[in-house]
Amino acid sequence: MIDAALRASLCRILGEGRLRDDEESLRLYSGDLYQEGARCAAVLRPGDEASLAAAVREATRANLSVVPRGGGLTYVSGYTPESPGYLIIDTGDLDHIIEVNAEDLYVTAEAGTTWRQLYDALAPLGLRLPFFGTFSGAGATIGGGLSNGAMFLGSARYGSAAEIVLGLHVVLADGTVLQTGQMGVGRSKPFFRTYGPDLTGLFVHDAGAFGIKSRATFRLIRAPARLDFLSFLVPNVTAATHILSDIARDDLVEEIYIVDPVQTRQRLKDASIVADLTMLAKVIGQEKRLLRGLKSGIELIRGGRDFLDADLYAVHMVCAGRSEPAVAADVAAARAIALRYGATEIPNSIPKASRAAPFTDLSGVLGTEGDRWAALNCKVAHSDAERLLAATDAIFARHAAEMKDAGVVITLLISAMSNHVFSYECVFRWFDTWLPLHRSAHPDLSRYTEPPVNLPARALIARVRMEVVDCFHDFGAASSQIGRTYRYLDGLKPAPREFIRSIKALVDPGNHMNPGALGAIAVREIRRKPSP
């Protein structure tokens, strides 16, 4: 609990109902999708930037830590410090789209805006973000994405959220609102990022350790006039990796990703007739010509579920461009690369359906049978991909018997980011009692029976995760969602490490802003206490 006088002051600043300290809220906001952390003292939900800044100033003057939280859909302890008593800043009500400038091609929105909100607002105008969201974009926010390296939709061509942001408003620990990019230049429009040193870059992928994002401006593109899709079966992950890397290097696709056999079969199995018919309407709707749309829809229904009996990897991709000939040329080039590595082309149901409805509900916070999951992600150069796969496979092989006994399954999602980055994600899946965030985010838990507590699986996963994190560290890999899991500071050379610490000391001299984020402390803590 916080001091009564401070509580009253914060309530005056924020307004009625914007401070929560009931037991249910405290438990929900003190954990993520992987584990529950130390208990927060209260949850603040400001309604505007001014009250956010004033509340942060009041809290840090009282020597309390403040921790920003967007959609909360993380699994790396990004907003759960090791010590109790901190304040969670829930940005969910900072969700207004402030300006869409179709002439100068930028959009400004508050940090609690979700990727789906932006997508839905821009689509009727024929506009889009270049990278335009994550799988969890129905609940994930732009502020959280900028703090945590968000990527996926459009990333094979345009990179991550960091590459498309033009400027920010950031609330510092003392309540100062810092504007970056052209937002910080006189009366300029926020159309440009790097006039002078790149202040925006300092606050991107900082895990909220430098400040709380309250507003962001992104560049826009005119939505591609033509889309096409390709899917292939590949005999092994090595061949699939070569296909992905070669196609990414040639800049032929907006998305390309590899899905392992377990996940591909499950995805098709989980679809229903009703869902297929709904998706058919959406696929037809995104086609420019009715006859082509009907043909695509029929292919989706015919090919959607019964072609993946073999234990093979699938490679899916989305091609996009301004004209049909341009996209056809990219499709032909991508197909030639895939066939060169022995791939077999299959109906393109999965990427087509994913683009027809890119932001579904948040049922994905659990597996398709009510199982829990937690991912680890890293990014390496394409030339290091095979070595990385071999190294992580060796870790899983060492623990194969233990994982089988505990009911732990590993699945993979591999993708490309821009034309030069190989992104690897291993996902730990197991049956275990649900956490408060699962209950809050999932739209319908009634379809499942909650599994019992599975302490052996939790302890095993904690140990194996740390081995994988150490493996990533040995590769010098980058990762999304640094939080308190990855060894970010440990991995820096002395000069950049001290520079980062100097920036932290400048913008947050009291270490009030999400203390312990950026990884180094938490890794040592977890090694001493392997069971979450």
Image (cartoon, grey):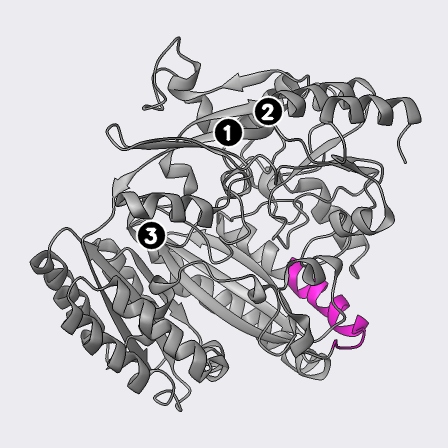
Q: Position of residue 348 (x, y in %)?
A: 28, 75
Q: Identify the residue under disc 1.
A: 215
Q: Identify the residue under disc 3.
A: 154
* Magenta residues, start to end: 450-466
Q: Is residue 44 visible?
A: yes
Q: What secondary structure prevails in the magenta region?
A: helix
Amino acid type at circle 2 is: Glu
How many C-alpha atoms fall within 10 Å of the one at disc 2: few (<14), some, or many (≥20)?
A: many
Amino acid type at circle 3 is: Gly
Q: Identify the residue under disc 2.
A: 49
| 287 versus 297 height, above or below | above
In the image, taking residue 338 as reference, residue 187 lies left or right, namely right
Q: Quadrant of the C terminus?
A: bottom right
Q: Secondary structure at mark 3?
A: loop
CB of mark 1 within 8 Å of CB of mark 2?
yes
Residue 520, quarter of picture: top right
Task: Name the residue nearer the viewer: 243 or 292.
Answer: 292
Amino acid type at circle 1 is: Arg
Q: Earlier in the sequence, mark 1 or mark 2?
A: 2
